[in-house]
Image: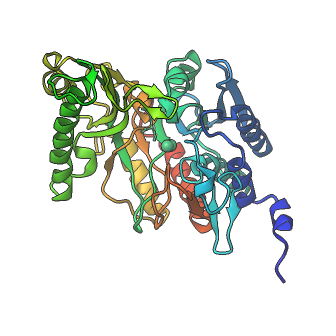
Amino acid sequence: HLRRRDEQEEEDTPITRFQKYLRINTAHPNPDYSSAISFLNSQAQSIGLRSQILLLTPDKPILIVTWPGSDPSLSSILLNSHLDSVPAEPDKWDHPPFSAVRTSDGKIFARGAQDDKCIGMMFLEAIRNLRELHNFRPIRTIHLSYVPDEEIGGLDGAAKFVGSKEFEELNVGFVLDEGQASTTDEFRVFYSDRSPWNLIIRAVGTPGHGSRMYDNSAMENLMKSVEIMTRFRETQFDIVKRGWAASWEVISVNPVYLKAGIPSPSGFVMNMQPSEAEAGFDVRMPPTADPDLLKQRIADEWAPASRNMTFQITEKGPMRDHMGHPLMTSIDDSNPWWSVFKQAISAAGEKLAKPEILASTTDARFMRQKGIPTLGFSPMKNTPILCHDHNEFLQDTVYLKGIKVYESILVSLSSFNGISS
Ligand SMILES: CSCC[C@H](NC=O)C(=O)O
Ligand SMILES: [Zn+2]
Ligand SMILES: [Zn+2]
């Protein structure tokens, strides 16, 4: 006999706890961080873990949960996830994005189900099982961090966190942060991110009657740039389409807004050519790309002063570590953490795909900048990639499997004794 849904959801199980976290609306622009933190904190307490809340920015709390290891002289393991989500357009979803509905085929629908509330809860459930079912005791200390604002650049989140004295005190030797779902039977793992720039180009030009043909209007100047940038975009995209490079190996330049025209009550004035126009672009660079070369190209071709153009680049976070090296975690035997991680995945009976660079960007770049080896990993396989998409969901069995995978990872990492600091 089928039980009623509300009866099922009154139970306290890994799935209902995941649903509870998903129902807390931490989407921008008004993320409810305080409810998320108190929920996670109560979960940590119910497992018997220590926790502390950092308020490095008003209204943007960071939660740190700690499971002390038996050898505090060893560096610790940090599992990081972000509290926030991108917004959702409820009208375009089959289920309300903060309902966390589980359909009869086991799909849990919610904004954040994949990105990245799944891992934040898997961490806690894995620790709960290791303590309660397996009576496991780590040698290295394990910390969990829950940070705000990843989706808007992380400056008041992970960036401030890694710069704090509290972070120093954690003595972190290795970090796992979020990755991305895999559509195959192999898990994906990421050793670097592309670096994001926000690029705004602005044109000024001669205003005039809408009927006149003349050179050097703001719109003409801007649109020439857009054409040149579109051609550059195509050269990069063609390389990917031909299979010569992965999407993370090229520079992406995608237009995200166009702004021009003289507003009128019914829309825009149609018989005036405006004197100003601008466009915004999301630019992503592979970690090994030369940022100065791209800056030169922008100054020479995309926004040349000769065409009455100016530009503004906002670099969203670091691109190099203190040694001037690109932010990449090594994935060869020079990095013992990599070997331990790989071995933990096989011990869980799972396979890893070839390590990748993430085409988008995560908080991992702030940890890598501190010189701490950091991998991006979200154990979701045979799963469509739905981060930032409508109808984001995660299959219940995939979620439960992820907990098991983290149990294996935590046992291996926290028992690893080979590096003394
Ligand atoms: C500009 S930093 C923003 C980080 C964000 N992260 C996930 O989507 C991204 O756009 O990749
Ligand atoms: Zn994310
Ligand atoms: Zn995201």
Foreground of the two, 369 or 49: 369
The answer to whether 309 is drawn above or below residue 281 in the figure is above
Exactly how many numbered labels are in the figure? 0
> Quick check: 139 left or right of 211?
right
Residue with the most extreme bottom position: 1
Quarter of the picture containing the N terminus is bottom right
The answer to whether 238 is drawn above or below residue 43 in the figure is below
Q: Name which quarter of the figure residue 215 lies in.
A: top left
Point out residue 48 in the picture as x, y percentages from the top left corner: 77, 41
Quarter of the picture containing the C terminus is top left
> Quick check: 237 left or right of 397?
left
> Quick check: 129 left or right of 192?
right
Point out residue 148 in the picture as x, y percentages from the top left corner: 59, 31
Foreground of the two, 166 or 150: 150
The answer to whether 253 is drawn above or below residue 200 in the figure is below
Q: Name which quarter of the figure residue 277 lies in.
A: top left
Point out residue 283 in the picture as x, y percentages from the top left corner: 30, 34
- Taking the image as drawn, is residue 364 in sight? yes
Point out residue 17 in the picture as x, y percentages from the top left corner: 74, 53
Query: What residue is shown at x 65% (from left), y 35% (from top)?
Result: 31
Query: What residue is shown at x 38% (from left), y 59% (from top)?
Result: 352
Applied colour scheme? rainbow
Foreground of the two, 174 or 362: 362
- Taking the image as drawn, is residue 289 in sight? no
Write down which quadrant ligand 1 falls in. top left
